Image: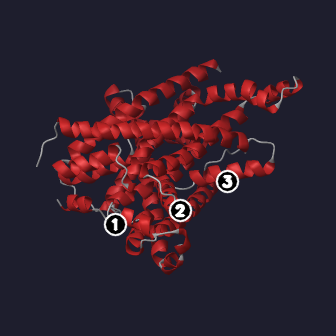
Amino acid sequence: MDKFGSPEFLFLLQGLKWTVLLTIISFIGGGIIGLAIALARVSPVKIVQRIAAAYIALFQGTPLLMQLFVIYYGLALMSFNIDAWVAVSIAYTAHASAFLGDIWRGTIQSLPKGQIEASNALALGYVSRMRDIVLPQALKISLPATIGFAVQLTKGTSLAAIVGFVELARAGQIVSNLIFQPLLVFGIVGIIYFFLCWPMSILGSHLERKLSLGN
Amino acid sequence: MDSFRLWLHGHGNGEAVFPLSLQEISLSKLDFSIVIERWADLLHGVLFTLALSATGIFFALVIGVVGVAMRRSGSRLVQVPVIMFVELIRNTPFLVQIFFLFFALPLIGIRLGPTVTAIIALAINGGAYSIEIIRGGVDSIPRGQVEAGAALGMSRRQIFSDIILIPALRSIYPALTSQFILLTLTSSVCSSISASELTHFAQRIESETFRSFEVYFTITGLYLLISWLIMAALSALGNRHFSYPNQ
């Protein structure tokens, strides 16, 4: 039986690095694809709208763990010889794109109709209307929800532990198996997650209060 | 140490199984017959998941209501622990929470099976979110209504249930519904302590057959069905009991 010392703590921090990296990659990737999903979801073309809606419903109606399993094994099945790390990133990116797409869809639709009518009256094209009028406003309103999802995503990356990817939660399992002090180790892992997520939560609720005051 | 040994050696989803199944399956060998053969196991898994989630949801609601009542009490000493509980649970992953409980409960002398531990974990997690949602609804009730109730001579309990809680539940019903569907989907994580539910059953079939993709693809569809089922049931319930009288 070993004690929990600095090597163990450093190992957890190594895991933390992968948690943060995985979150950032899937948030950025999910953000880019999510923007496309949101735009597709509010597109005037019915079939495009439906496909985007189905994509969102699929990810919102199934467990993240299953999304991870299906994408992970699915990629292997298609004989893509890729790293576990890449497979996991793809899975989280797809997950994030559906949720961010739905959040932004909601805020785009919440904008007053007059904004779009005004931009039509000014003869703005689709690109200019979206880029200059709709998206800047919609993204600003969506900030609290977007940050809230970033917290969810950070916590969600812990499930990568179940497919064997060594991030913070998995690092915790490994250390716990080595030193036989599960309570101490998972307590510390929990505290690290807390201090990763809590500032984001505070920022989110702060922005929410600021926005609701503005209205 | 029993729980620890189980944990150490895993339950079929360990790394030893994983790379093997990755290499062995290729697209040409896609075979769903295993899944069809084991349909009875999967059906059991669905029923267990429904039971696990329903119990978790019930206790999450209890925690939610009690938590909001505590949050609204005049005493800081009662409020602060609730605030800390909510923040702690909402900012840590469910996986870490369930592991912590799984090891913590035996240490304080409480020996429960993995399934009961899973229910407790789901109730605690869902409870923290419920407190926040219900509090939002309760805060939206104008103070004048509470004062009117007091003026009519209603008791504190009557005011809380008839003037605050029921109308608040109406306005937050949609948010609670999606939170409880999320709780049901989250219950799949309980497989990591081998609680009896759908994902755990699937992992058992997978470890016997190595048909990872087929098995998980199928139960993903089952989860989709489950969440539609719960959504339909909860919205029917909501239309009956929690819709606005004038709508």
* Vertical relation: A161 (above or below) B149: below
Which residue lies under the disc numbered 1? B12
Which residue lies under the disc numbered 3? A54
Give how far across and how far down residue A118 sits, in percent: 84, 24
How far apart in space, not on screen, are marks 1 and 3 (Cα)?
33 Å
Three-letter code, disc 2: Thr
Nearer-the-camera pick, B154 or B211: B211
* Quarter of the view holding residue A188: top left
Give how far across and how far down residue A165 sits, in percent: 37, 50
Do the dots labelled 1 and 3 sit on one chain? no
Do the dots labelled 3 and 2 sit on one chain? no
Residue at mark 3: chain: A
Give how far across and how far down residue B206 sits, in percent: 42, 70
Point out the residue furthest to the top here: A214
Nearer-the-camera pick, A173 or B127: A173
Q: Sequence order check: which comes first, mark 2 or mark 1?
A: 1
Nearer-the-camera pick, B163 or A99: A99
Three-letter code, disc 3: Ala
* Vertical relation: A59 (above or below) B115: above
In this rendering, does residue B152 appear at all? no
Left of B28 or right of it: where is A17? left
Which residue lies under the disc numbered 2? B220
Left of A191 or right of it: where is B40? right
Callout 2 secondary element: helix
Labelled pair 3, 2 in contact (Cβ < 8 Å): no
* Vertical relation: A171 (above or below) A117: below
* Vertical relation: B36 (above or below) B172: below
